[in-house]
Amino acid sequence: MLLLLVFAAALSALASQAQTTSLAFTHVTVIDGTDPSPRLDHTVVIRDNRIVAVGPAASTPAPTGARVFEAQGKFLVPGFWDMHVHTVVPGGREVLALYVANGVLGVRDMAGDW
């Protein structure tokens, strides 16, 4: 019985440590491609790698315990695509990580053998 209680306490402690981590970008300018105008002074909340809230900073608070990034003067945009790349050239595949580092999350290979 004591072992069961210790096990239950350990599981409870692990569950509290594994709480969802949220990120909040506050006072950021959002450009999402659905409107030609940028959305100024917004808060964007991310939980479990998903955007769960986007709204004006005045009415969209960061969740309690969220890691908050003050992003005034910064922009949030969707990941970019480069629709014309050639990875068959020498070193072509080795530079794919550079695309990600520069916000390009997808490419269309025009002459590759993938």
Image (cartoon, rainbow, N blue to C red):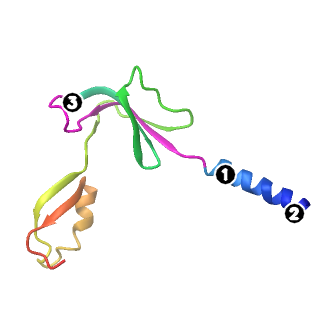
Q: Does residue 13 appear left or right of residue 60 in this picture?
A: right
Q: Quadrant of residue 97?
A: bottom left
Q: Which mark is residue 3?
A: 2
Question: What crowding class fits label 1: few (fewer than 14 Cα within 10 Å), some (14-19), or many (20 or more)?
Answer: few
Q: Is residue 3 above or below residue 75?
A: below
Residue 94 placement (x, y as % from top left): 23, 73
Closer to the eye: label 3 or 1? 1
- Measure the C-alpha gap from mark 2 to mark 3: 58 Å
Residue 30 placement (x, y as % from top left): 27, 34
Question: What crowding class fits label 3: few (fewer than 14 Cα within 10 Å), some (14-19), or many (20 or more)?
Answer: some
Say which residue label 1 marks: 15
Chain part drawn in magenta:
19-38
| Circle nearer the N terminus (2, 3) | 2
For the residue marked with disc 1, what is the amino acid?
A: Ala
Q: Residue at x 65, y 50 (%)?
A: 17
Q: Does residue 66 appear left or right of residue 83 in this picture?
A: right
Residue 23 placement (x, y as % from top left): 46, 41
Q: Residue at x 21, y 74 (%)?
A: 93
Q: Which mark is residue 38?
A: 3
SS at badge 3: loop
